[in-house]
Amino acid sequence: MSSIYKVFMMIFILVISAALTGCGGDSAGGKGGKKVEITWLVRTDANMIKWEEQTIADFEAKNPNIKVKLETIPQDEIDQRLTTMISSGNVPDVWSSNWANSGFATYRGMDALLDLTSYVQNDAQQLKGIPDHLMDIYKIDGKIYGIPMLGIGSYLFYNKDLFDEAGLEYPPTDWNDTSWNWDKALEYAQKLTKDNGKAADKIYGLLDNNSPARKAWSFGGEFFKPEAYTTGVMGEPAILDNPKNAEALQFFTDLINKYKVSPTPSALDAVSQLGDPFMTGKVAMVVNGGWGFWAYKPAEFNWGVAPIPYIEGRIPTLYVDPWNISAKSKHPDEAWEFVKFLADPNGAAKSFMEATSATPADATLMEDWYQQMAEITGMSVEDIKQVNDGAFVDGKEADNHLITKFSIIGTTIDQTMTAVYEGKKTVDEGLKEIDKNLRSLDLD
């Protein structure tokens, strides 16, 4: 009996051990025998595809039981298709809420984003290079919903060759240099504008690519109340409350219609048929987001970067894009392993910066980025550091990232402002109309 009992116990122990091993495999981030597939949704971008494919290959090599399926969607289609995915429950596991025309607040308001707080706490050491002021953008009521991958400011990019032809000194890189103000930028724009009567040959001195609300920020204006950025709900607009709004938009309208150094919307559409107006040499100075650092790399002329012209209260727009995980992801642990891999400054985050020249969120990569941008622009590392870092001192995250349903809000504003820029309405008329139209929106 004793030998039979011993055999029985050995068999029992083996069965239990096998069962425990099997249970552990399914819950350990795909490390057991079962292979898990997660979906990574990205914007269609020919400049990114090689990095995306290599990143997947590198991740799968280190995580053989997690397969990553890449899904690419044109940016203009992301909102519509994501809404359908979310409502059907067929969601991507990993994506960026700011890569749609709406943004983070809209998708958090749809309960589409997973609370990442516990993951971040467990892996805090691996994310320590991301500054708190960037992490805090995606911390709502103490919960973390996104891991910043980019930290982009706004700047004035200028064509050095056109400056040289006009005999103009390059703008400074110090955001506190008050000599580089909007009056000076207008003076430069007038000297840089070339008009021989042929629309196709005209070179405009200055183009501000910002939305009307962000143009107002450049002058210290504000279209919305402070609580809109914390609650995510637009509420009552503040368009008529701040005189800086009218001052800003009058200035930019005058650039078009009075000084004729900026294109009308219709002229801009025509010029853009040939490509980006700055890249084709049709615009000498352009105010744009920091994606210009890499978008303008192929330019066939020399270019530089300067602060947005000074005025008291000036607020540069920030674009801090996060990696997110869908709240309804069927494999959140595996998705987190991938997000952590994407954020690794010694791995995918570094290769992303090297491949795209995008400004990294992780501070440990910034010195490499400064050097890379210095080589591209011909500016010194110190000047690149000064112009980039200065944008973040008073910068504010983009309104469409923090206010829900902003695609509707933005469209409503643009419909009126197009008429203002074309000289069909005055600035005062336009602002009153925008205020009325925004108040009539049903955004519940």
Image (cartoon, helix red, strand yellow):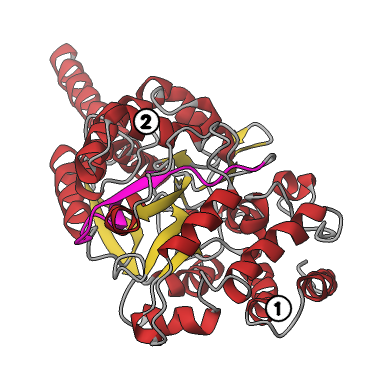
Q: How far across and down, in percent of the image, does residue 234 sit?
A: 76, 58
Q: Amino acid at mark 1?
A: Thr
| Residue nearer the viewer, 74 or 144 | 74
Image mark for residue 49: none
Q: In terms of image quadrants, where is residue 127? A: top left
Crowding at label 2, few (<14), some or many (≥20) Cα neighbours within 10 Å? Answer: some
Residue for badge 1: 416
Q: Magenta: predominant secondary structure element?
A: loop
Q: Which image quadrant: the C terminus?
A: bottom right
Q: Nearer the viewer, residue 16 or 115?
A: 115
Position of the N terminus, as image quadrant, is top left
**Whole-Å distance between the Cαs marked 1 and 2?**
38 Å
Does the magenta portion include 295?
A: yes
> Residue at coordinates 41% horizontally, 63% vertically from top-left?
192
Residue drawn at x 47%, y 26% as measured from the top left: 131
Q: Is residue 42 magenta?
A: no
Residue type, numbered disc 2: Lys
User: Element type at marker 1?
Assistant: helix
- Give the secondary structure at mark 2: helix
53, above or below 196, in the image: above
The x and y percentages for residue 199 are 41, 86
Q: Measured along the vertical axis of the image, is residue 213 above or below residue 319?
A: below
Q: Is residue 259 left or right of residue 387?
A: right
Residue numbers of the magenta segment: 294-311
- Which image quadrant is residue 103 in? bottom right
Residue, far front: 167
**Is there any visible trace of residue 239 in the rendered image?**
yes
Instruction: Report the front residue among 36 and 85.
Output: 85
Rendered image: mark on residue 385: 2
Q: Between disc 1 and disc 2, whose residue precedes?
A: 2
**What is the x, y in percent for residue 178?**
58, 36
